[in-house]
Image (tube, rainbow, N blue to C red):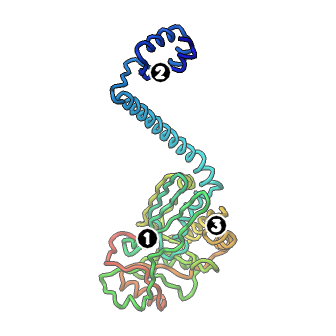
Amino acid sequence: MNHDEATEKLDAYVAGTLGAEQAGEMDAHVAECEDCQAELAPVDLAGFDPSDDGEQVQASVRKAMRRTALAAAAYAVMATVVLLIATVLVVQPLLLARFDRAAMAARAAYEVPMLFNPGVQVDELTIRSGLAHRTTTVTVGIPLGSGTHPVGPFGAEVTVFGMDIKMNAGSQDPTITDAVLPGLDDGTVVTVEVGLPEPLDIEAAQALASDPGRDVRITWVGFGLPSRSFRPIGYPICRQADTPSDRLLGATSASWGGTWTGVVPDVRGAVDKAAAGLEAISSQSEVADTVGGRMELRSIVAALKDGDPAITSVVVTGPTPEVVAFLADTGIPHGAVLAVGFYDWGSPVCGR
């Protein structure tokens, strides 16, 4: 059998369909022909029985599929690891946190509730990051007697392409004192925002906060500042000294918590902290624009730092009869009720 004839019969030879005589001739030719040996080398005929209904072939296919699945899973794990590394090294620091936008958005999430929502104080702050976003959540409340009335939620969401900062306490629904206080009994405590009959300077406001003349506590003061975009601006006067650090606010994951009990009221400190918070927020253009505009924020900062802003409103909390008497003593006709609860006046509040 010559080479050309053997080449034509290779497929039948491999399939085992040649007769005995031709199969013998092919055996003899293949034993001497290097080209045919090379052609047959990838095919393993050892142990192959074409009469086994393809079971060996099916088993081989299943093994190959398992190897392919394992390889695909390994590639998926590698791709996930690469994506996480890229997120940590590229997306978070270079895109989300570019120009301090993420840290300043977290700062705004902390400061905005207290600046633009009378009576509100921040109790907790949490920062969590995903693959392409960073969320700051703050837990806030209004002091109510010795406890806290929860409001909110507040927070900031930062993505690669934009951000959202919540400005207003959605659950705050102030009601005029004339419609609420007469119906409350001695077993309740109440928190009220009131406008002062005459603006007070810092020293006079401090004297009122230190000794309101009644068993009540002043927890927040409002500044008499012009503002086109915001409600009256103010700040808590009974907050702890330590605020979240810049390092904490710039972290991809962090938490902070504070307490308000036993803190001495400090009106001047409230003015300084309000100015510092607004100045930090205004330093980042995207955050400043989201909050209300860099130029207006800077004008408010200048008024707080360069002048002696008048105190035009306060938030007061205490037993209902004491709050009613405080309003009468100070000549305040009415105000806005921010929170009402059962009597709770056991722990020290705002230094008293």
Q: Is residue 6 visible?
A: yes
Q: Which residue is mark 1?
A: 141
- Classify 10 Å Cα crowding around label 1: few (below 14), some (14-19), many (20 and above): many
Is residue 133 shown above or below 66? below
Q: CA distance from mark 1 to mark 3?
A: 24 Å
Residue marked by disc 2: 43
Q: Position of residue 305 (x, y in %)?
A: 65, 70
Q: Amino acid at mark 1?
A: Gly
Question: Which element carries disc 2, helix, strand or loop?
Answer: loop
Under tag 3, what secondary structure?
helix
Residues at badges 2 and 3 in contact (C-beta under 8 Å)? no
Residue drawn at point x = 44 percent, y = 11 percent = 24
**Location of residue 163 by image quarter:** bottom right
Residue located beneath label 3 in the image: 288
Give how far apart the Cα atoms at labels 2 and 3 are: 72 Å
| Residue 117 position in % (x across, y down) | 51, 75
